[in-house]
Image: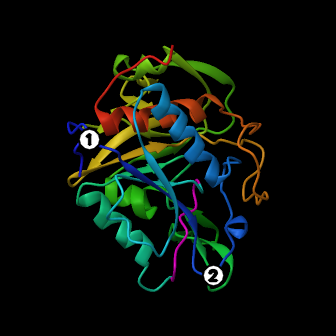
Amino acid sequence: MFIRNKSCFCPKVGIIYSVSKVEPNNIPRVWTDVAPECWGSLVKKAAKIANKKIRIKLIDARSSFDSFNVIINPYGGNLPELNFVAFPVYNKLLDYIKNGGFFVNIADIPTYWSFNPLINRLVDRTPAVYDIHGAVSRNFQRTPLLEELALSAFNLGEQNKNKFKLDDRYSGYGEKEILLRLSRCVKIESHIESVTLPIKLRPDLEVTPLFFCNYGDGLCLISMSWLDREKYDKNFPRRECIDYGADNKDLEEVIPYLIIQKLFGIKYNKT
């Protein structure tokens, strides 16, 4: 899918924006308060800085993903679905990535939830585990996409904001480090390419909140941090993309940069 060496390369970025007959503003966003349409503006800005051309399209979950170089899910931990029998959006996404696509999830555990338009509500996609007393827990490793990608995720709980150094490969967006309030991370294993330098929780355990992961011939960029710490499941009306009030604002700049860097195979400095 990547034809970046051609001078005419003008990649298409599809941003999931609607599903079935549901209005976009009625699709819940989980742990992000950045409106879906804002990601188009942010990616365009990153492309302009790199002097590259890019096309953005807001798409329905029913649309084919095949013609897009990037698919962005802007709903955080929620992947909108069409039905909960065949899970056509999820399976279409796996085929897209496997065949060379580039999938970006902007916040939280991808596919932990799904929005079901048939009942107009969020539904857990992570299977429940019941103990002998009937108490329910849900294991991140069983979340559909994490299980498919063999990712081990951790809930870090309340964390203070700290600066985390970026790997040298990804510091060209203009900063050597980003300010983050960690919420969740994954264990760094052989198939994970961390954007930050490894965070050591124990001598034998290094984790990352922001990483690339291969699947088949394709690529995923996943940010586990929340873009809104206080609330989730927000439904704001369409608005201008200038003041998000987000908890991890640096991510709104670095994620679009990472998309452009991978698409064009470049490293650039925004200054």
Q: From the viewer's perspective, is residue 90 above or below residue 85?
A: above
Q: Is residue 14 magenta?
A: no
In the foreground, 185 or 219 = 219
Up-down: is 84 above or below 210?
A: below
When asked about the image quadrant of residue 170, the answer is top left
Residue 111: in sight, yes or no? yes
Q: Which residue is mark 1?
A: 191
Amino acid at circle 1:
His
Question: Which residue occupies 49% across, 19% down?
Answer: 270
Residue ID for mark 2 = 21
Above/below status of 182 relative to 127: above
| Residue 80 drawn in magenta | yes
Q: Secondary structure at mark 1?
A: loop
Q: Residue at x 67, y 47 (%)?
A: 34
x, y percent for residue 81: 52, 74
The type of residue carrying mark 2 is Lys
Residue 146 in percent (x, y) is at 40, 55
Residue pictured at 32% horizontal, 65% vertical: 66
Q: What colouring method underlies this structural image?
A: rainbow
The part of the image, by quadrant, that contains residue 19 is bottom right
In magenta, the rendered stretch is 76-83
**112 sits left or right of 189 in the view:** right
